[in-house]
Amino acid sequence: MQHAIVSRDDWLTARRELLKVEKEITRLRDKVARERLALPWVRIDKEYVFDTLDGPRTLADLFDGRSQLLVQHLMFAPGWKEGCPSCSFMADHIDGMNMHLANHDVTMIAVSRAPLAEIERFRRRMGWQFRWVSSNGSPFNYDFRVSFTPEEVASGIIDYNFGEWRETGEEWPGVSAFFRDEAGDVFHTYSTYGRGVEVMMGTYAMLDLAPKGRNETGGMDWVRHHDRYAQMPRGAAE
């Protein structure tokens, strides 16, 4: 993209025009947030059991004493050598958020279908500290439409992102939210899929401010597991 080179006054004029659009987006985002909070909830009647480092735990147990739970549906199926690079990019943001979320009555974890031993091996490789549990043997992933049976995949159409999805595959990303009341009942309050999961990608928000923007040629083809980038950036942890 070619950019005009202008005076500071002309730049300020253009910047103020863009600010008007940014404010419209901010107001719309606030409106969407209010409508999200107003969504009805669904009581979770099925008892999902997860394999964790502390032994088998129910969905209610995963709240860790808090009333709100956020789940990253991290794409990592049984037999995979590593988690999905894009989902891993998302997960790279969790540890920095968790210290703040935990002190605001929110527990955040990741859930995958891979067995716990495979999850732990990859989690240690990535150096992540957040809690990551296995739904292996549970219908959880299938019920929340982030994992699909071979029959569904073979059909050429899967029920993903609240509609028909023709890019089939056994695993897809998502983020789900749950609430636990004082009686111990658990409710599903929200899920987002597709590009909605960008909510976890703080790196993208900063790239959007950079002079070249996201600078992508094929979606997230530039993203790697963070231990596979050719060179560690100056100032990053070694």
Image (cartoon, helix red, strand yellow):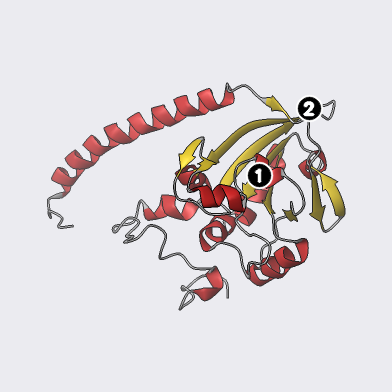
- Considering the numbered disc 1 on the image, is that residue within a helix, a strand or a loop? helix
Q: Is residue 85 left or right of residue 180?
A: left
Camera-near label (2 vs 1) is: 1
**Residue located 71% across and 32% down the image:** 179
Inter-mark Cα distance, 2 to 1: 25 Å
Q: Is residue 81 left or right of residue 168?
A: right
Residue 172 seen anywhere in this rendered image of the structure = no
Instruction: Give coordinates of residue 151: x percent, y percent.
Output: 59, 50
Q: How many numbered tags mark residues here? A: 2
Amino acid identity at mark 1: Tyr
- Along the viewing direction, whichever of 101 and 5 lies nearer the viewer: 101
Q: Quadrant of the N terminus?
A: bottom left
**Residue located 75% across and 61% down the image:** 115
Is residue 122 depicted above or below 54 in this figure?
Answer: below
Amino acid identity at mark 2: Asp
**Residue located 46% across and 78% down the image:** 231
Residue farthest toward the right in the current orientation of the protein: 55
Which residue is denoted by mark 2 in the rendering?
181
* Residue 142: image tag: 1
Tags 2 and 1 in contact by the CB under 8 Å rule?
no
Question: Residue 191 sits in which quadrant?
Answer: top right
Is residue 47 depicted above or below 80 in this figure?
Answer: above
Instruction: Give coordinates of residue 55: x percent, y percent.
Output: 87, 55
- Considering the numbered disc 2 on the image, is that residue within a helix, a strand or a loop? loop
